[in-house]
Amino acid sequence: MPEGPSIVILKEAVQAFKGKKVTEATGSTRKFDVSLLTGKKITDFKSWGKHFLICFPKFTVRVHFLLFGSYRINEQKDAIPRLHLQFSKGELNFYACALDLIEKPLDEIYDWTADVMNEHWDADQAMKKLKASPKMLACDALLDQTIFAGSGNIIKNEVLFRIRVHPLSYIGKLPAAKKKQLVQEAVNYSFDFLEWKKKFELKKHWLAHTKRTCPRDHIPLKKEYLGKTNRRTFFCDVCQKLYV
């Protein structure tokens, strides 16, 4: 599942189509009649967390890539796209993704202050949400899109390793300074992720995610499926303190 930084990269990559008219829209989605998009002009591209938003004058198409979704710009895969947008010069294709048509203003749908990569991100609001959920596990907090929109499993594992917090720690047991560090590093790592992804070197910088040995203690890292989402979690029992 693409995390927030990957959606930001997509948003940047499609800017040439901003202000352009869709000459033909087709696709296999049954969520809405894609022919509605034919002849409509794209006014903007936005992102919120893991959601890619294609904005038209009176509605927005939301794309969520789920676990196996993908896209192609000015080329096609050997598969039927969930959504195909043709322009006079170029095309966009989206595969194996979830699509929705949003007819309300986006400001009524999205809390932009919760998106770790948005200019309106609000760290104070994130702190308030954490304090309101003392029984939440650290591994769940970093995957909660209402607190850290855009944060995914890679970010979760790497942030917890950076700040030396065990994934099964209770948020309410973290010292105030450690909660603040968690919030700060969720943003810091997301922008590091973005920079490394653009350079095609993201995996080279992983310290915990998918790794077998702790680079600090040189002992085997644990791999367990933790939290309410049961996602893969890599951590060190020595340097990542358990707060319970």
Image: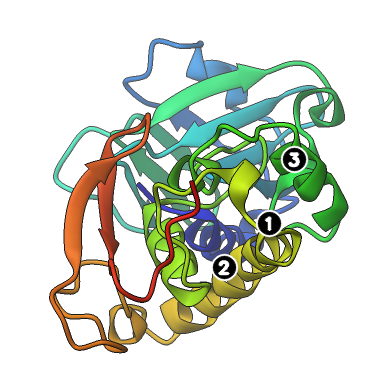
Q: Is residue 126 left or right of residue 84?
A: right
Which residue corresponds to mark 3? Answer: 131
Residue 190 - label: 2
Earlier-in-chain disc, 3 versus 2: 3
**Colouring scheme, one of rainbow, by chain, secondary structure, one colour:** rainbow
Which of marks 2 and 1 precedes in the sequence? 1
Where is residue 237, by image quadrant?
bottom left
- Left or right: 106 in relation to 182: right
Location of residue 71 with respect to 34 vertically, above or below = below
Please state which amino acid type lies under the numbered disc 3: Lys
SS under mark 2: helix
Mark 3 nearby-residue class (10 Å; few <14, some 14–19, many ≥20): some
Residue identified by numbered label 1: 116
Residue 83 lies in quadrant: top left
Q: Are marks 1 and 2 in contact (CB under 8 Å)?
A: yes
| Residue type at tag 1 | Val
